[in-house]
Image (cartoon, rainbow, N blue to C red):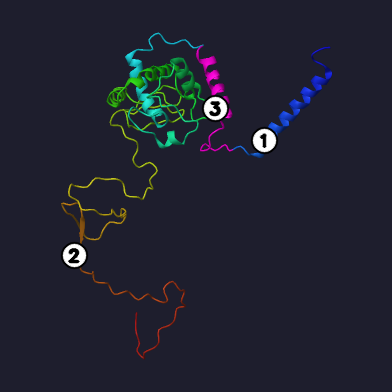
């Protein structure tokens, strides 16, 4: 008697169909709470954790480590990027949890207390992890900079808070080469510019246009002499003030009334001839009784 019969295949097919319909009904019902503040059940969490670990391990260990991964220059440069990009989730030596690290689920690992294999660190930083707070930094970061971060993570758990801060301060700040950040290097605490397609660098002392985006009739920024009392700058008056303008030492303006000037005499208007321009017929002068010779 064969082990697999038509009847057993039919039964297996029916059971598979029922399982698929049940799973679809479960998903469609919305009964499972997807909120990050409600943890997975133990079987679901174990399944997802195993899936994540096996997926990373299968891919990460095909990578070839750089020969100079322990180079202090790599570690130093990676410190600047870690400080700018990772501390909100993975923390810094001696620091407590952040609002972000508390709110994420699954909780991000505290990388100041555990060492991540360099292969896996590189792969996760570059590709990210689905359905988690870990982004794929490889979309904006060159591989060389990712290896620098992986190198730094090997040293991070051994650093004291003071050593960490000193290393970050010497790192040159946030700089990772990728398409949207090429040409940028910012010191710790500096502003990070990420303008896609417009890579540029600002030399020391160079400033952006301070008037950009301001209405043209608004007062322009200006400095006041030391000791100037608080005041509100009035909008620029486009009309010239009538009178003499005097500027005091504190920067205030005072306008003196102009001296009255004599009103020029007005000439008496000439009465216009009502007949000017009219074609009048000639008339003989009236006789006054005298004989005039011309």
Residue name at image x 38 percent, y 24 percent: 113
Location of residue 231 (image quadrant): bottom left
Residue 54: x and y, percent?
Answer: 55, 18
Location of residue 65 (image quadrant): top left
Along the horizontal axis of the image, is 184 left or right of 62? left
**Residue that numbered label 2 is attached to:** 259
Disc 1/disc 3 C-alpha distance (Å): 22 Å
Disc 3/disc 2 C-alpha distance (Å): 81 Å
Give the residues drawn in magenta, as a range.
33-61
Which of the two marks, 1 or 3, is nearer to us in this view? 1
Residue name at image x 41 percent, y 37 percent: 99
Q: How many marks?
A: 3
| Residue lying furthest top | 67
Q: Are marks 1 and 3 in contact (CB under 8 Å)?
A: no
The dot on residue 130 is 3
Up-down: is 258 above or below 115?
below
Residue name at image x 34 percent, y 84 percent: 292
**Residue that numbered label 1 is attached to:** 26
| Residue lying furthest bottom | 289
Location of residue 83 (image quadrant): top left
Q: For this rendering, which residue is in front, 254 or 16?
A: 16
Residue 247: x and y, percent?
Answer: 18, 54
Up-down: is 8 above or below 205?
above
Q: Earlier in the sequence, mark 1 or mark 3?
A: 1
Q: Earlier in the sequence, mark 1 or mark 2?
A: 1
Q: Are marks 1 and 2 in contact (CB under 8 Å)?
A: no
């Amino acid at each position: 008697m064969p082990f697999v019969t038509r009847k057993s295949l039919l039964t297996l097919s029916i059971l598979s169909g029922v399982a698929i319909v049940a799973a679809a009904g479960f998903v469609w019902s919305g009964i499972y709470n997807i909120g990050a503040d409600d943890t997975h059940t133990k079987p679901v969490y174990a399944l997802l954790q195993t899936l994540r670990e096996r997926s990373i391990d299968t891919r990460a260990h095909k990578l070839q480590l750089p020969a100079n991964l322990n180079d202090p220059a790599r570690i130093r440069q990676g410190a600047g990027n870690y400080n700018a990009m990772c501390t909100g989730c993975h923390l810094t030596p001696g620091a407590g949890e952040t609002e972000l690290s508390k709110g994420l689920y699954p909780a991000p690992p505290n990388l100041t207390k555990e060492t991540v294999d360099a292969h896996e660190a590189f792969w996760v930083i570059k590709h990210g992890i689905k359905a988690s707070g870990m982004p794929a930094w490889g979309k904006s970061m060159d591989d060389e900079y990712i290896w620098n971060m992986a190198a730094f993570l090997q040293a991070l758990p051994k650093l004291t808070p003071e050593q960490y801060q000193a290393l970050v301060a010497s790192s040159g700040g946030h700089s990772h080469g990728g398409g949207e950040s090429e040409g940028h290097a910012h010191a710790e605490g500096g502003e990070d510019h990420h303008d896609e397609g417009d890579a540029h660098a600002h030399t020391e002392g160079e400033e952006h246009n301070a008037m950009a985006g301001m209405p043209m009739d608004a007062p322009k920024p200006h400095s006041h002499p030391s000791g100037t009392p608080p005041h509100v700058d009035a909008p620029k008056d486009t009309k010239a003030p009538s009178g003499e303008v005097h500027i005091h030492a504190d920067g205030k303006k005072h306008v003196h009334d102009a001296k009255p000037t004599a009103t020029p005499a007005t000439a008496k208007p000439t009465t216009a001839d009502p007949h000017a321009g009219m074609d009048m017929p000639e008339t003989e002068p009236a006789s006054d009784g005298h004989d005039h010779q011309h």
